[in-house]
Image: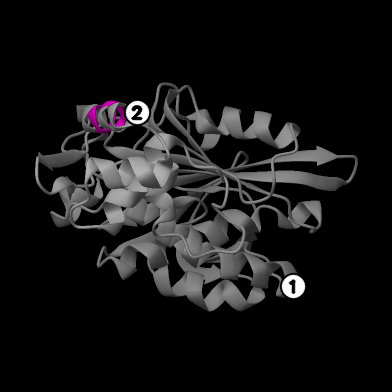
Protein backbone atom coordinates (compact mmCIF):
# COMPACT_ATOMS: atom_id res chain seq x y z
CA UNK A 1 0.00 0.00 0.00
CA UNK A 2 1.43 3.37 -1.00
CA UNK A 3 1.90 5.63 1.99
CA UNK A 4 0.97 9.31 2.04
CA UNK A 5 3.56 11.93 2.91
CA UNK A 6 1.99 12.24 6.35
CA UNK A 7 2.20 8.49 6.93
CA UNK A 8 5.82 8.43 5.81
CA UNK A 9 6.67 11.20 8.29
CA UNK A 10 4.81 9.38 11.05
CA UNK A 11 6.63 6.15 10.20
CA UNK A 12 9.99 7.97 10.43
CA UNK A 13 9.02 9.45 13.81
CA UNK A 14 8.12 5.98 15.06
CA UNK A 15 11.52 4.62 14.03
CA UNK A 16 13.62 7.26 15.79
CA UNK A 17 13.77 8.83 19.22
CA UNK A 18 14.52 12.29 17.81
CA UNK A 19 14.83 13.24 14.14
CA UNK A 20 15.55 16.64 12.66
CA UNK A 21 13.38 18.44 10.17
CA UNK A 22 16.27 18.39 7.70
CA UNK A 23 16.66 14.63 8.02
CA UNK A 24 12.94 14.20 7.36
CA UNK A 25 13.12 16.55 4.38
CA UNK A 26 16.08 14.62 2.93
CA UNK A 27 14.40 11.23 3.45
CA UNK A 28 11.15 12.29 1.81
CA UNK A 29 12.70 14.66 -0.75
CA UNK A 30 10.41 17.53 0.22
CA UNK A 31 10.96 20.96 1.74
CA UNK A 32 11.34 21.80 5.42
CA UNK A 33 8.19 23.92 5.12
CA UNK A 34 6.24 20.87 3.88
CA UNK A 35 7.57 18.88 6.83
CA UNK A 36 6.44 21.58 9.25
CA UNK A 37 2.94 21.64 7.74
CA UNK A 38 2.59 17.86 7.96
CA UNK A 39 3.81 17.84 11.57
CA UNK A 40 1.16 20.45 12.39
CA UNK A 41 -1.48 18.28 10.72
CA UNK A 42 -0.38 15.23 12.73
CA UNK A 43 -0.73 17.25 15.93
CA UNK A 44 -4.26 18.21 14.90
CA UNK A 45 -4.97 14.50 14.39
CA UNK A 46 -4.13 13.86 18.03
CA UNK A 47 -0.48 12.84 17.91
CA UNK A 48 1.67 14.45 20.59
CA UNK A 49 4.89 15.56 18.91
CA UNK A 50 7.58 17.49 20.74
CA UNK A 51 9.82 19.90 18.82
CA UNK A 52 13.28 21.14 19.77
CA UNK A 53 15.51 23.44 17.73
CA UNK A 54 18.64 21.33 18.20
CA UNK A 55 17.29 17.76 18.17
CA UNK A 56 14.23 18.05 15.94
CA UNK A 57 10.99 16.16 16.45
CA UNK A 58 10.00 13.46 18.93
CA UNK A 59 6.80 11.40 18.89
CA UNK A 60 5.81 11.50 22.56
CA UNK A 61 2.43 9.81 22.15
CA UNK A 62 1.15 7.87 19.16
CA UNK A 63 -2.44 8.59 20.11
CA UNK A 64 -5.23 6.08 19.60
CA UNK A 65 -5.76 6.15 15.87
CA UNK A 66 -7.19 3.62 13.42
CA UNK A 67 -5.18 4.77 10.43
CA UNK A 68 -3.57 2.18 8.14
CA UNK A 69 -0.13 3.04 9.49
CA UNK A 70 -1.27 2.71 13.09
CA UNK A 71 -2.82 -0.71 12.42
CA UNK A 72 -0.14 -2.12 10.15
CA UNK A 73 2.58 -1.69 12.74
CA UNK A 74 0.91 -4.65 14.50
CA UNK A 75 -0.06 -6.71 11.44
CA UNK A 76 1.92 -9.86 10.67
CA UNK A 77 -0.31 -11.39 8.00
CA UNK A 78 0.12 -12.48 4.40
CA UNK A 79 -3.24 -11.21 3.14
CA UNK A 80 -5.63 -9.87 5.74
CA UNK A 81 -5.21 -6.16 6.41
CA UNK A 82 -2.64 -5.62 3.68
CA UNK A 83 -5.10 -3.16 2.17
CA UNK A 84 -6.82 -0.85 4.67
CA UNK A 85 -9.39 1.84 3.98
CA UNK A 86 -9.75 4.23 6.92
CA UNK A 87 -12.67 6.61 7.33
CA UNK A 88 -13.11 9.18 10.06
CA UNK A 89 -16.89 8.76 9.82
CA UNK A 90 -19.38 6.78 7.76
CA UNK A 91 -22.88 5.37 8.06
CA UNK A 92 -21.63 1.80 8.28
CA UNK A 93 -18.42 0.05 7.26
CA UNK A 94 -20.53 -2.83 5.93
CA UNK A 95 -21.95 -0.65 3.15
CA UNK A 96 -18.48 0.56 2.14
CA UNK A 97 -17.22 -3.03 2.19
CA UNK A 98 -20.07 -4.19 -0.06
CA UNK A 99 -19.22 -1.42 -2.52
CA UNK A 100 -15.54 -2.30 -2.45
CA UNK A 101 -16.27 -6.00 -2.92
CA UNK A 102 -18.38 -5.24 -5.98
CA UNK A 103 -15.48 -3.19 -7.34
CA UNK A 104 -13.17 -6.21 -7.11
CA UNK A 105 -11.36 -5.27 -3.91
CA UNK A 106 -8.81 -7.93 -3.03
CA UNK A 107 -9.40 -10.51 -0.35
CA UNK A 108 -8.33 -9.24 3.04
CA UNK A 109 -9.25 -5.62 2.38
CA UNK A 110 -10.24 -4.00 5.66
CA UNK A 111 -12.56 -1.04 6.04
CA UNK A 112 -12.30 0.66 9.41
CA UNK A 113 -13.72 3.88 10.83
CA UNK A 114 -13.63 5.93 14.00
CA UNK A 115 -17.35 6.67 14.11
CA UNK A 116 -20.36 4.98 12.51
CA UNK A 117 -23.55 7.02 12.34
CA UNK A 118 -25.79 4.07 11.48
CA UNK A 119 -24.06 0.95 12.75
CA UNK A 120 -26.20 -2.14 13.00
CA UNK A 121 -26.05 -5.57 14.50
CA UNK A 122 -27.83 -8.89 14.08
CA UNK A 123 -31.55 -8.76 13.26
CA UNK A 124 -31.20 -5.11 12.22
CA UNK A 125 -30.59 -3.86 15.75
CA UNK A 126 -28.86 -0.51 16.25
CA UNK A 127 -25.23 -0.62 17.38
CA UNK A 128 -24.47 2.11 19.94
CA UNK A 129 -21.51 4.29 18.97
CA UNK A 130 -19.31 6.79 20.77
CA UNK A 131 -16.87 8.78 18.66
CA UNK A 132 -13.30 7.47 18.77
CA UNK A 133 -14.16 5.07 21.61
CA UNK A 134 -14.82 1.88 19.68
CA UNK A 135 -13.80 -0.13 16.65
CA UNK A 136 -16.02 -0.51 13.60
CA UNK A 137 -14.50 -2.64 10.88
CA UNK A 138 -15.49 -4.84 7.96
CA UNK A 139 -13.26 -7.47 6.42
CA UNK A 140 -13.69 -8.67 2.83
CA UNK A 141 -13.11 -12.40 2.26
CA UNK A 142 -13.47 -14.41 -0.94
CA UNK A 143 -13.61 -18.03 0.24
CA UNK A 144 -13.91 -21.00 -2.09
CA UNK A 145 -16.49 -22.77 0.03
CA UNK A 146 -20.12 -23.95 -0.29
CA UNK A 147 -22.78 -21.35 0.44
CA UNK A 148 -24.12 -23.21 3.47
CA UNK A 149 -20.74 -23.07 5.22
CA UNK A 150 -20.34 -19.28 5.08
CA UNK A 151 -22.14 -18.80 8.41
CA UNK A 152 -19.36 -20.71 10.14
CA UNK A 153 -17.12 -17.69 9.57
CA UNK A 154 -19.15 -15.83 12.19
CA UNK A 155 -18.22 -18.47 14.75
CA UNK A 156 -14.62 -18.49 13.55
CA UNK A 157 -14.36 -14.71 13.92
CA UNK A 158 -15.83 -15.00 17.41
CA UNK A 159 -13.16 -17.50 18.42
CA UNK A 160 -10.42 -15.29 16.97
CA UNK A 161 -11.72 -12.19 18.72
CA UNK A 162 -12.05 -13.98 22.07
CA UNK A 163 -8.48 -15.27 21.72
CA UNK A 164 -7.24 -11.80 20.78
CA UNK A 165 -8.84 -10.20 23.81
CA UNK A 166 -7.60 -12.92 26.14
CA UNK A 167 -4.08 -12.35 24.81
CA UNK A 168 -4.56 -8.81 26.10
CA UNK A 169 -5.77 -10.16 29.49
CA UNK A 170 -9.40 -9.34 28.76
CA UNK A 171 -11.61 -12.26 29.97
CA UNK A 172 -13.82 -12.57 26.89
CA UNK A 173 -16.41 -15.28 26.28
CA UNK A 174 -18.57 -16.13 23.27
CA UNK A 175 -22.37 -16.00 23.10
CA UNK A 176 -23.64 -18.08 20.17
CA UNK A 177 -23.71 -17.19 17.39
CA UNK A 178 -22.26 -13.70 17.05
CA UNK A 179 -21.55 -11.87 20.33
CA UNK A 180 -18.47 -11.56 22.52
CA UNK A 181 -19.04 -10.84 26.21
CA UNK A 182 -17.18 -9.80 29.32
CA UNK A 183 -18.80 -10.95 32.57
CA UNK A 184 -22.10 -11.55 30.80
CA UNK A 185 -22.26 -8.16 29.09
CA UNK A 186 -21.77 -7.54 25.39
CA UNK A 187 -18.46 -6.00 24.38
CA UNK A 188 -18.48 -6.92 20.68
CA UNK A 189 -20.79 -8.08 17.94
CA UNK A 190 -20.19 -9.78 14.61
CA UNK A 191 -22.32 -9.42 11.49
CA UNK A 192 -21.56 -11.64 8.49
CA UNK A 193 -23.06 -10.92 5.08
CA UNK A 194 -22.60 -12.51 1.66
CA UNK A 195 -22.50 -11.48 -1.96
CA UNK A 196 -23.32 -14.43 -4.21
CA UNK A 197 -23.43 -15.28 -7.90
CA UNK A 198 -25.73 -18.17 -8.85
CA UNK A 199 -24.73 -20.92 -6.41
CA UNK A 200 -21.28 -19.64 -5.44
CA UNK A 201 -19.87 -17.14 -2.97
CA UNK A 202 -18.50 -13.96 -4.49
CA UNK A 203 -17.55 -12.43 -1.15
CA UNK A 204 -18.18 -12.71 2.56
CA UNK A 205 -18.03 -9.51 4.57
CA UNK A 206 -17.39 -9.86 8.29
CA UNK A 207 -18.41 -6.76 10.20
CA UNK A 208 -17.17 -6.37 13.77
CA UNK A 209 -17.99 -3.72 16.34
CA UNK A 210 -15.99 -3.57 19.57
CA UNK A 211 -16.56 -1.32 22.58
CA UNK A 212 -13.10 -0.26 23.72
CA UNK A 213 -12.92 3.07 25.58
CA UNK A 214 -16.61 3.70 26.31
CA UNK A 215 -17.19 5.03 29.82
CA UNK A 216 -20.98 4.88 29.78
CA UNK A 217 -23.94 3.59 27.79
CA UNK A 218 -27.54 4.73 27.46
CA UNK A 219 -29.66 3.64 30.42
CA UNK A 220 -31.51 1.02 28.35
CA UNK A 221 -28.19 -0.68 27.54
CA UNK A 222 -26.43 -0.26 30.87
CA UNK A 223 -27.29 -3.76 32.13
CA UNK A 224 -26.25 -5.57 28.94
CA UNK A 225 -23.39 -3.64 27.34
CA UNK A 226 -19.84 -2.98 28.47
CA UNK A 227 -16.49 -1.88 27.12
CA UNK A 228 -12.97 -3.15 27.63
CA UNK A 229 -12.23 -0.06 29.73
CA UNK A 230 -15.36 -0.35 31.87
CA UNK A 231 -14.90 -4.06 32.50
CA UNK A 232 -11.16 -4.15 33.10
CA UNK A 233 -9.90 -0.61 33.59
CA UNK A 234 -7.48 -1.17 30.71
CA UNK A 235 -6.76 1.38 27.99
CA UNK A 236 -5.70 -0.68 25.00
CA UNK A 237 -4.86 0.92 21.66
CA UNK A 238 -7.61 0.19 19.16
CA UNK A 239 -5.07 -0.33 16.39
CA UNK A 240 -3.39 -3.06 18.45
CA UNK A 241 -6.68 -4.91 18.87
CA UNK A 242 -7.36 -4.75 15.13
CA UNK A 243 -3.86 -5.89 14.20
CA UNK A 244 -3.81 -8.76 16.69
CA UNK A 245 -7.25 -9.90 15.54
CA UNK A 246 -6.06 -10.09 11.93
CA UNK A 247 -2.96 -12.02 13.01
CA UNK A 248 -5.11 -14.48 14.96
CA UNK A 249 -7.87 -14.85 12.39
CA UNK A 250 -5.76 -15.39 9.26
CA UNK A 251 -4.28 -18.83 10.10
CA UNK A 252 -7.67 -19.98 11.39
CA UNK A 253 -9.31 -18.87 8.14
CA UNK A 254 -6.69 -20.70 6.05
CA UNK A 255 -7.24 -23.87 8.10
CA UNK A 256 -11.02 -23.55 7.75
CA UNK A 257 -10.67 -23.32 3.96
CA UNK A 258 -8.84 -26.65 3.81
CA UNK A 259 -10.22 -28.60 6.78
CA UNK A 260 -13.65 -27.14 7.56
CA UNK A 261 -15.02 -26.10 10.93
CA UNK A 262 -14.98 -29.37 12.92
CA UNK A 263 -11.49 -28.87 14.36
CA UNK A 264 -12.54 -25.51 15.85
CA UNK A 265 -15.33 -26.94 18.01
CA UNK A 266 -13.09 -27.43 21.10
CA UNK A 267 -11.83 -23.84 20.86
CA UNK A 268 -15.36 -22.48 20.58
CA UNK A 269 -16.51 -24.53 23.58
CA UNK A 270 -13.45 -23.39 25.55
CA UNK A 271 -14.67 -19.79 25.29
CA UNK A 272 -18.42 -20.49 25.26
CA UNK A 273 -20.49 -18.47 27.69
CA UNK A 274 -22.94 -20.52 29.83
CA UNK A 275 -21.73 -23.86 28.50
CA UNK A 276 -23.54 -26.62 30.44
CA UNK A 277 -25.82 -24.03 32.03
CA UNK A 278 -29.57 -23.56 31.68
CA UNK A 279 -30.39 -21.19 28.81
CA UNK A 280 -33.38 -20.00 26.83
CA UNK A 281 -33.23 -20.03 23.04
CA UNK A 282 -35.68 -18.37 20.66
CA UNK A 283 -36.41 -19.15 17.03
CA UNK A 284 -39.11 -17.78 14.76
CA UNK A 285 -41.28 -20.76 15.60
CA UNK A 286 -40.59 -21.51 19.26
CA UNK A 287 -38.86 -20.71 22.53
CA UNK A 288 -36.81 -23.52 24.06
CA UNK A 289 -35.28 -23.86 27.52
CA UNK A 290 -32.55 -26.39 28.23
CA UNK A 291 -28.88 -27.00 28.95
CA UNK A 292 -26.38 -25.58 26.46
CA UNK A 293 -24.24 -28.56 25.46
CA UNK A 294 -21.99 -26.95 22.86
CA UNK A 295 -21.93 -27.03 19.08
CA UNK A 296 -21.72 -29.68 16.40
CA UNK A 297 -19.05 -30.03 13.72
CA UNK A 298 -20.99 -27.74 11.40
CA UNK A 299 -21.48 -25.02 14.03
CA UNK A 300 -25.10 -25.77 14.95
CA UNK A 301 -25.99 -25.24 18.60
CA UNK A 302 -26.97 -28.15 20.83
CA UNK A 303 -29.52 -27.72 23.62
CA UNK A 304 -30.44 -30.59 25.93
CA UNK A 305 -34.15 -30.44 26.71
CA UNK A 306 -36.48 -32.73 28.62
CA UNK A 307 -37.10 -34.61 25.37
CA UNK A 308 -33.41 -34.94 24.42
CA UNK A 309 -30.77 -33.07 22.44
CA UNK A 310 -31.96 -30.54 19.88
CA UNK A 311 -29.80 -28.85 17.24
CA UNK A 312 -30.40 -25.30 16.04
CA UNK A 313 -28.96 -23.71 12.89
CA UNK A 314 -30.56 -20.30 13.34
CA UNK A 315 -31.76 -18.93 16.67
CA UNK A 316 -30.95 -16.45 19.41
CA UNK A 317 -29.89 -17.14 22.95
CA UNK A 318 -32.04 -14.91 25.15
CA UNK A 319 -29.94 -13.13 27.76
CA UNK A 320 -31.77 -9.88 28.22
CA UNK A 321 -35.34 -8.64 28.11
CA UNK A 322 -36.06 -6.93 24.82
CA UNK A 323 -36.03 -3.15 24.88
Horizontally, residue 196 falls left or right of residue 242, namely right
Tag nearer the camera, 1 or 2 = 1
Q: Which quadrant would residue 264 be assigned to in this image? A: bottom right
Residue at x 74%, y 32% (from the top left corner): 102
Horizontally, residue 91 falls left or right of residue 260, namely left
Q: Is residue 38 magenta?
A: yes
Q: Secondary structure at mark 1?
A: helix
The image shows residue 95, relative to residue 171, as above or below, that is: above
Q: Determine if residue 23 is in view.
A: yes
| Mark 2 surroundings within 10 Å by alpha-carbon count, few (fewer than 14), some (14 through 19), many (20 or more) | few
Q: Earlier in the sequence, mark 1 or mark 2?
A: 1
Q: Position of residue 48 (x, y in %)?
A: 16, 40
| Mark 1 surroundings within 10 Å by alpha-carbon count, few (fewer than 14), some (14 through 19), many (20 or more) | few
Mark number for residue 323?
2
Helix, strand or loop: magenta stretch = helix
Rounded to the nearest angstrom, the CA distance separating label 1 from label 2 is: 42 Å
Q: Position of residue 127 (x, y in %)?
A: 40, 31
Q: Secondary structure at mark 2?
A: loop
Mark number for residue 258?
1
Q: Position of residue 46 (x, y in %)?
A: 22, 34
Magenta region: which residues?
Answer: 37-42
Residue at x 13%, y 54% (from the top left corner): 233
- Residue toward you, 6 or 303: 6
Amino acid sequence: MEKSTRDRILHALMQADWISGQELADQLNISRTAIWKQIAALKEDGYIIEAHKKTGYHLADRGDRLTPLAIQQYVRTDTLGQQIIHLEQTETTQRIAHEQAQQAASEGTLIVCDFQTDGRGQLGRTWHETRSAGIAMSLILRPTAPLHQAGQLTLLAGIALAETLRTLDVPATIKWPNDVLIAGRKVAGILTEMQTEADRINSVIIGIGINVHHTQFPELLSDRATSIHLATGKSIARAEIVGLFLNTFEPMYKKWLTEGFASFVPAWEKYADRLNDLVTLRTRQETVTGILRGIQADGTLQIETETGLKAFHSAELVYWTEI
